[in-house]
């Protein structure tokens, strides 16, 4: 059902297995090409930015001509069909290779995860850690449409024929990377090296939380500045993919706005679905299963605009109460007081950044926020911890603790969740006034405590067994941290409980 929208979005449409192998293989081949072309400069970062990965070379700014040379080197590896061999290296041999080639993140990981042997991939004399499954030959990249795009001071390696730039996301990731550098914790190995017997872990957690609080304060300041300039913000729209922490973030933002002199009121838009008899997809066969509740057409956009305009104009409204069991609204609705002169309406939802959703509202009154945990934690020097896996771990923990769902059920529904995000959320992220990076890089060590036992319960005959094993392999790279380190006001508490807010 998502295929037409994905094709229109310009994202590549691949089978699940191709999707799993193509992007990691591209990352690996790019790292091989860089080592061949620029042996004295370490390739690092690898931010996931849309349909590609943003890289930089340590100590060298790449020109457009340099990026063309790199693309040619990648092409040569692909055309020659270089073998990508999975090999097992003695720990000391692998460690010495990474040390000799200044691959500091891979070296740090091995220092904190010592085993007799290390799984690696080798191609054309270049060795990298085996972190994800790859194709057996570089020639497999011929099946897709990769490209290299200059993105100063580095480049983007994209698995789409035409790459759509992501300036807002790259800017947020760079900001987060500067924070990681200031803490001296840019990779998983450095995170593991923080000791549990002194204050290093506790202080790092606090620094991560102070950074989150500073972002909330910055948003409140921007809203105040808009008021002083004569263009007051009356509606804040918050959208982001699942398990980004939208509920806790919106709750805390309302408090920060109140401290800044505003009356911030959250409006739940989940109840603004059209009644079943007005749902477009229901009309043909009169089957509820045909209704796509992720589609913007399922929302009563006209009523959303009418109510927002009424509230900011000083009028009260009756907000609908949608009954998911019946598909219709219950009663006349719930009374919602008009906004006072210093009032700000805070709404969050899957379509909050979609221009169609707020088309009836004066654009000068809107302030749009995209929120997502955009990780910059390096696994090795050219591979980050996947942000999608970070969100999946959060969701799995919440599903188990507060919805009694086993890990296998969360895993089974994950692909459909992600397809909906590609269609309805990510295309609008660059239109946001503020990108809120909700990642706190201490989270995975804490989540590991909850999730390792759950993932080990996924049986070998389950369709999601491979994904469960992939996540276990990821968690194995991290040390375990106790949940007691997490402050009550932390966004992570939305997913592990015992927080200061009743948000799950």
Image (cartoon, rainbow, N blue to C red):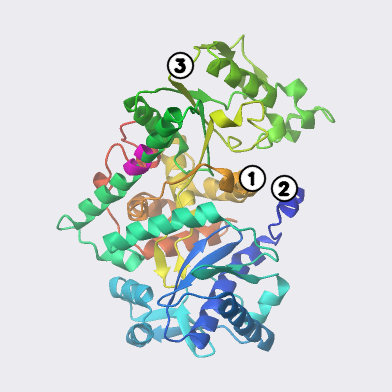
Q: Is residue 326 visible?
A: no
- Vertical comparison of 66 with 252: above or below: below
- The quadrant of the rendering that contains the C terminus is top left
Question: Which residue position holds label 3?
Answer: 341
**Residue 425: where, in percent of width, then height?**
60, 44
Q: Is residue 476 left or right of residue 275?
A: left
- What distance separates the C-alpha of mark 2 from that of mark 1? 7 Å
For disc 1, the neighbor class at 10 Å (few under 14, some 14 to 19, many from 20) is some
Q: Nearer the viewer, mark 3 or mark 1?
A: 3
Q: Which mark is residue 63?
A: none
What is the number of callouts on the image? 3
Q: Name the quadrant containing residue 160.
A: bottom right
- What distance separates the C-alpha of mark 2 from that of mark 3? 42 Å
Q: Is residue 117 visible?
A: yes
Question: Which residue position holds label 1?
Answer: 420
Q: Is residue 470 left or right of residue 106?
A: right
Question: Which residue position holds label 2?
Answer: 2
Residue plotted at (16% across, 54% down): 199
Residue plotted at (49% across, 50% down): 392
- Vertical comparison of 407 with 473: above or below: above
**Residue 103: where, in percent of width, then height?**
38, 79
Please say whether residue 214 is one of the residues in the magenta stretch.
Answer: yes
Instruction: Specify start and end residues of the magenta stretch as a single range.
Output: 213-217
């Amino acid at each position: 059902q998502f295929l037409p929208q994905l094709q229109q979005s310009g994202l590549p449409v691949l089978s699940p297995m191709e999707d799993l192998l193509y992007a990691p293989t591209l990352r690996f081949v790019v790292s091989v090409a860089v080592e061949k072309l620029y042996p004295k400069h370490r390739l690092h970062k690898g931010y996931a930015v849309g349909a590609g990965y943003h890289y930089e070379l340590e100590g060298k700014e790449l020109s457009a001509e340099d990026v063309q040379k790199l693309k040619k080197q990648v092409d040569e590896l692909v055309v020659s069909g270089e073998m990508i061999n999975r090999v097992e290296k003695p720990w000391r041999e692998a460690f010495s290779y990474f040390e000799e080639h200044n691959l500091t993140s891979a070296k740090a990981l091995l220092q904190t995860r010592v085993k007799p042997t290390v799984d690696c991939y080798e191609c054309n004399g270049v060795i990298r850690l085996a972190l994800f499954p790859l194709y057996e030959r570089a020639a497999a990249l011929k099946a897709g449409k990769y490209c290299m795009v200059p993105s100063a001071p580095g480049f983007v390696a994209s698995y789409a024929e035409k790459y759509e730039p992501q300036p807002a996301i790259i800017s947020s990731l760079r900001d987060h990377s500067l924070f990681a550098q200031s803490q001296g914790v840019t990779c998983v190995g450095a995170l593991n090296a923080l000791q549990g017997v002194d204050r290093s872990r506790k202080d790092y957690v606090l620094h991560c939380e102070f950074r989150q609080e500073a972002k909330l304060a910055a948003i409140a300041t921007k809203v105040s500045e808009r008021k002083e300039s004569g263009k007051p913000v009356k509606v804040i729209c918050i959208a982001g993919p699942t398990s980004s922490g939208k509920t806790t973030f919106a709750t805390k933002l309302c408090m920060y706005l109140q401290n800044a002199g505003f009356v911030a009121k959250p409006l739940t838009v989940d109840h603004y679905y059209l009644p079943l008899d007005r749902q477009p997809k229901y009309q043909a066969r009169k089957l509820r299963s045909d209704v796509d509740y992720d589609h913007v057409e399922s929302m009563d956009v006209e009523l959303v605009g009418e109510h927002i305009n009424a509230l900011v104009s000083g009028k009260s409204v009756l907000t609908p109460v949608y009954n998911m069991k019946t598909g219709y609204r219950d009663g006349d609705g719930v009374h919602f007081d008009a906004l006072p002169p210093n009032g700000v309406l805070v709404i969050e939802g899957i379509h909050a950044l979609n221009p169609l959703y707020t088309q009836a509202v004066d654009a000068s009154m809107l302030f749009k926020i995209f929120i997502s945990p955009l990780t910059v934690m390096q696994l090795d020097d050219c591979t980050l911890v996947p942000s999608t896996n970070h969100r999946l771990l959060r969701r799995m923990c919440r599903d188990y603790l507060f919805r009694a769902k086993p890990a296998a059920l969360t895993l089974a529904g994950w692909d459909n969740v992600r397809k909906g995000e590609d269609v309805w959320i990510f295309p609008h992220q660059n239109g946001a006034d503020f990108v809120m990076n909700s990642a706190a890089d201490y989270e995975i060590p804490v989540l590991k405590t909850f999730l390792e036992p759950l993932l080990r319960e996924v049986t070998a005959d389950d369709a999601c067994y491979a994904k469960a094993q992939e996540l276990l392999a990821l968690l194995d790279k991290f040390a375990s941290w106790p949940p007691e380190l997490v402050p009550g006001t932390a966004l992570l508490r939305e997913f592990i409980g015992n927080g200061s807010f009743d948000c799950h």
